[in-house]
């Protein structure tokens, strides 16, 4: 599949069907500067960058990489992209140490039979809701622990639609990741309350109606028996 515009200046530029089966979905916001949400597992950096150029955007404008959580399929490309373009890496405070130490278990790098180099984090989110203003566009980074202690979900209202990025809200919930079912229950309720129009997920793509977004979240709430 080719990269494409999901909604007004919001693109998918990487993911299992686009760049590499090991990648979580990689989203790009073009708001005067370019912001990546997640960065793939690391093997596909060149492909992701080529996709950005193919859309007609300039990778030199990649100022920020916002990481939804500390797993390799989402963070793997970040060190290389930062090295090439000086992009600043943001992640929640509770998931930052895994990157900074290159922890093989907490980053799930060992699972993917690879390593993640210890990588400094530039911005650590530390409150339930971090509001960013980028090119006049408000973006909210919500702390939504569950899959990992520092998982975040991001939403923004643009062109009359609320777009939600909630990578790995499906789990898995595993002790070795520090997952927590009670947290996950609260977090997914918060996500339902957002009443988003579009959900950009981590591995299963994009859901484009309020009903599909809700059904998706409910299906996992039933699976984890909190519903
Ligand atoms: Zn993932
Ligand atoms: Zn994950």
Image (spheres, rainbow, N blue to C red):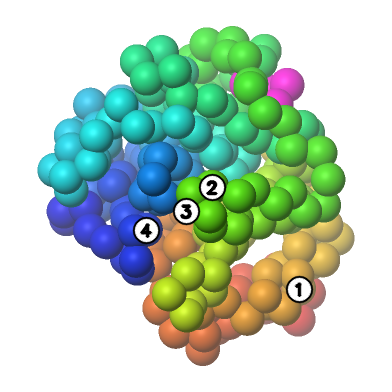
**Residue under circle 4?**
10
| Above or below 59: residue 212 | below
Mark 4 / mark 1, whichever is N-terminal:
4
Rounded to the nearest angstrom, the CA distance separating label 4 from label 2 is: 13 Å
User: Do we see residue 174 in this rendering?
Assistant: no
Mark 4 / mark 2, whichever is N-terminal:
4
Q: Nearer the viewer, mark 2 or mark 1?
A: 2
Q: Nearer the viewer, mark 4 or mark 2?
A: 2
Where residue 50 appears, x then y in whole percent? Answer: 18, 34
Rounded to the nearest angstrom, the CA distance separating label 4 from label 1 is: 25 Å
Q: Secondary structure at mark 1?
A: helix
Q: Secondary structure at mark 4?
A: strand
**Going 21% across and 52% down the picture, which residue do you hit?**
3
The part of the chain drawn in magenta is: 95-99
Rounded to the nearest angstrom, the CA distance separating label 4 from label 3 is: 15 Å
Q: In the rendered view, does 206 fall on the left or right side of 97? A: left
Q: In the rendered view, does 85 fall on the left or right side of 48? A: right
**Residue under circle 1?**
189
Decide: few, some or many residues near mark 4? Use Cα within 10 Å; few <14, some 14-19, many ≥20.
Answer: some
- In this rendered view, identify the residue nearer to me: 133 or 64: 133
**Residue under circle 3?**
202
């Amino acid at each position: 599949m080719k990269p494409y515009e999901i909604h007004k200046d919001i693109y998918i530029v990487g993911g299992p069907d686009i760049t590499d089966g090991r990648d979580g979905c990689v989203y790009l916001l073009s708001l005067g500067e370019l912001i990546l949400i997640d960065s793939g597992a690391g093997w596909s950096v060149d492909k992701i960058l080529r996709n950005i150029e193919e859309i007609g955007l300039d990778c030199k404008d990649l100022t920020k990489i916002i990481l939804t959580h500390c797993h390799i399929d989402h963070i793997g490309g970040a060190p290389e992209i930062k090295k090439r373009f000086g992009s600043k890496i943001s992640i929640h405070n509770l998931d930052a140490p895994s990157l900074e130490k290159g922890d093989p278990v907490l980053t799930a790098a060992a699972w993917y039979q690879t390593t993640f180099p210890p990588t400094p984090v530039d911005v650590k989110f530390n409150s339930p809701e971090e509001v960013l203003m980028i090119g006049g566009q408000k973006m909210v980074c919500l702390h939504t622990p569950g899959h990992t202690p520092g998982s975040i979900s991001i939403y923004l209202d643009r062109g009359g639609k609320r777009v939600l990025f909630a990578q790995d809200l499906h789990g898995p919930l595993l002790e070795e990741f520090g997952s927590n079912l009670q947290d996950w229950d609260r977090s997914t309720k918060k996500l339902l309350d957002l009443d988003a129009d579009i959900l950009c997920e981590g591995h299963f793509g994009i859901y484009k109606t309020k009903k599909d977004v809700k059904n998706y979240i409910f299906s996992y709430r039933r699976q984890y028996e909190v519903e």
